[in-house]
Amino acid sequence: MYHDPISRQQAPSSSPSIHTPAIQRQPDPAKITAIPSSRHILQLSAQLGNQQVGKWLAKQGTLQAKPVIQRARFLSEGNANSISERILHTLSLMEEDGDADSQQYEQLEEIYNNFDAGSLATETIEEIRALTHGSMFDRLDNLDTWMESLITGNVRSSNYPSSYSTAAQQALTTYKNNHQNPMDASECLCPNCNTYVAKTDMTIDHVIPVATHWNTIGRNTDRATRHTWYSDVNNHEYCCRSCNSSMGSGGVRYSMSVGPNYRG
């Protein structure tokens, strides 16, 4: 169904799989006419590479298309196929539950039937998120949770480092030594749960979450700036792995678009 425009030299046209719903409906013409422009940008990306296409877009004054290119970078071919398969599975489950006549089912079905390289643009992904987030239907809510996990992992791994600078790691070591368990040198205090835990279990957590930084600054700046912020000890606090995992991103959802000053 989907071919990654960055991993191939040509962009052959292909028709998406058509979901056969319980109730037949016609796709929205407005959506169909919106697809070719997105596909054109993706084809250019495949032929010229993202940097060259970015320069071309800047000359043409069409920076609004830049998120389309970034979307292709955030999602691999496997990720894109997984999304389409998950949507199809959700539609099938909703039919089994008798929800095939709901408005949200109709909207999701329409998205699926127009789901191809062009519709992987930021706008389409955001449309799915808006439709599924907090839905009254458990099937759609489950789809939203799964998609958010995929998006979070891809945006973060594509734009922020997987480890901290030497200075940041040394600051963590200093904290462990200064808050060592007087009865056991292998443990230190986790200030969040107020419990002594193994020093090896202590982690660095960001006071301002990575998702918040991405949405406000990171998505409109360069990689060096994002990496410097990531290891800034002034934005670090220390807690055990369990506490760190439970806090997550504070409920902040990663934006799918980038600004004109974004550099990958």
Image (cartoon, grey):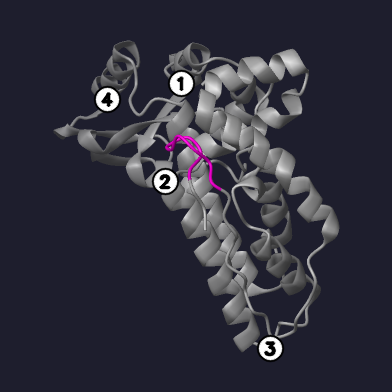
Q: Which dot marks residue 176?
A: 4
Q: Earlier in the sequence, mark 4 or mark 2?
A: 4
SS assignment at label 4: helix
Indicate which disc, 4 or 3, sits on the residue closer to the N terminus: 3
Cβ atoms under marks 1 and 4 closer than 8 Å: no
Q: Which mark is residue 230?
A: 1
Q: CA distance from mark 4 to mark 3?
A: 56 Å
In the depicted structure, whether residue 209 falls above or below residue 84: above
**Mark 3 vs mark 1: which is more N-terminal?**
3
- Image quadrant where residue 141 sits: bottom right
Q: Residue 104 at x, y = what percent?
A: 75, 70
Amino acid type at mark 1: Tyr
**Residue lying at 76% horizontally and 72% vertically, measured from the top left:** 106
* Nearer the camera: disc 4 or disc 2: 2
The label number, if any, that marks residue 98 in the structure image: 3
**Alpha carbon distance from label 3 to label 1:** 47 Å
Main secondary-structure element of the magenta-colored stretch = loop
* Residue tagged 2: 245
The spot of residue 39 in percent (x, y) is: 65, 41
What's the magenta region?
A: 4-12
The reply, left or right, for residue 212 in relation to residue 186 is right
